[in-house]
Amino acid sequence: LYRLACIDFQKKNYTRCELTLQNLLKDFPDHPLRTDWLYLIATIPVYERDWNRTIKEEGRFASGRHGVAPAPRSIPQEQLAPEAQFRVIWAYMALGDYHEVIRLTDKFFHKYHKNPLSGYALLLQGVAYDQLANTDKAIDAYQTLVDLYPQSPAAGKAVYLMTLSLHKANEPTRIVSALNHLNENLQRQEEIKSDEWRKNTLFWIAEGYYSIQDYKHAVETYRRFVELAPDHPMTPYALEGLAASLAAEGIEKDDKAKIYMQQAIQRAQELNLSAVASDAKLQLGKILFNEKDYDGALTQFDAYIQESTTSVRVAEALYSAGVTLYNQQYYQEAIKRWKRVIDGYRFSPLRAQAYLKTGQT
């Protein structure tokens, strides 16, 4: 009957599984497998996402008094209480009670700091602080996890969430400094290849370098991300960032920048990321303009204008297209583009420039 209950559990027939287990407890109160049955019953609400019941059921194991709730044979006695307490923290997290998550994690960490689950508890605490908009405390939790449990699968997620929090807080300098503070174990090539979270982190670190205009390191980090994750959904963004970083290093890098921007357009189109592909076309137009390839630049600007739905950037593309046409001595066509900025984008910072260029022309 217990095996049938386990099969029902695996098939997600939780109601029938629990009924069988309850009958077993009733009919065989002194059976050696009694604790296994109790443990499985306590596990059911976790999989059913019944978090209030999870907190109640796990309480019998969370106390750690093994005489009251001995561990099932498959779980070491010393692991039962921390596992149950961690499930309670998880339940409060799912219920959105972030203050309780923080409080229970502090208790859990001080009591079970040598237990691998402490790493996951710190991860939940960091997320809880993030949800409460306490970025500094969130960073502290993530950093503690990375420093104390570098081998934990949770460490990669912590690094990613830490950089993402800093990115949202618009603190690129701290993103970069966080990278330099990481344990060496987080930067080994073979570990990053096998950890999606750590690969994701590379992208945001590259964004941080780009934001503080450290284009040399931005290029290195974007390129590393692309090499490690060529099929990642963020790869088109990384290729675009790589191209923009190369272009920012000087006109001598424009040829390479052009290649990567074209790759960004191609990968974005393959992944059906039309907004990314359009934005890359605008950036490619700027690179071609700098190379005085005005025909090529105009083609990219026009493509962006036709495809984009971002009005602010459309004004930029129209203005740039006007300048491109002006440089080709197509003055009437240039004036038409600038008038579109004047008439259609009254709040654009380029409107005054468009007026000026129109008058001068």
Image (cartoon, rainbow, N blue to C red):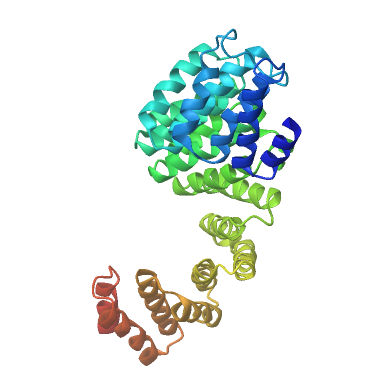
User: On screen, 152 above or below 234?
Assistant: above
Q: Residue furthest bottom?
A: 332
Query: Can residue 361 be seen?
Result: no
Question: Which corner quadrant of the image does residue 179 belong to?
Answer: top right
Q: Position of residue 291 (x, y in %)?
A: 55, 71
Near-viewer residue (51 or 19)? 19
Quadrant (top left/top right/bottom left/bottom right) for the C terminus: bottom left
Q: Position of residue 272 (x, y in %)?
A: 59, 69
User: On screen, 242 above or below 82?
Assistant: below
Question: Which corner quadrant of the image does residue 139 belong to?
Answer: top left
Question: Which corner quadrant of the image does residue 166 belong to?
Answer: top left
Q: Report the side of 348 relative to 103 (left or right).
A: left
User: On screen, 215 above or below 102?
Assistant: below
Q: Report the side of 29 relative to 167 (left or right).
A: right
Near-viewer residue (115 or 23)? 23
Near-viewer residue (174 or 359)? 174
Near-viewer residue (266 or 53)? 53
Quadrant (top left/top right/bottom left/bottom right) for the N terminus: top right
Q: Position of residue 256 (x, y in %)?
A: 64, 62
Q: Report the side of 103 relative to 81 (left or right).
A: left
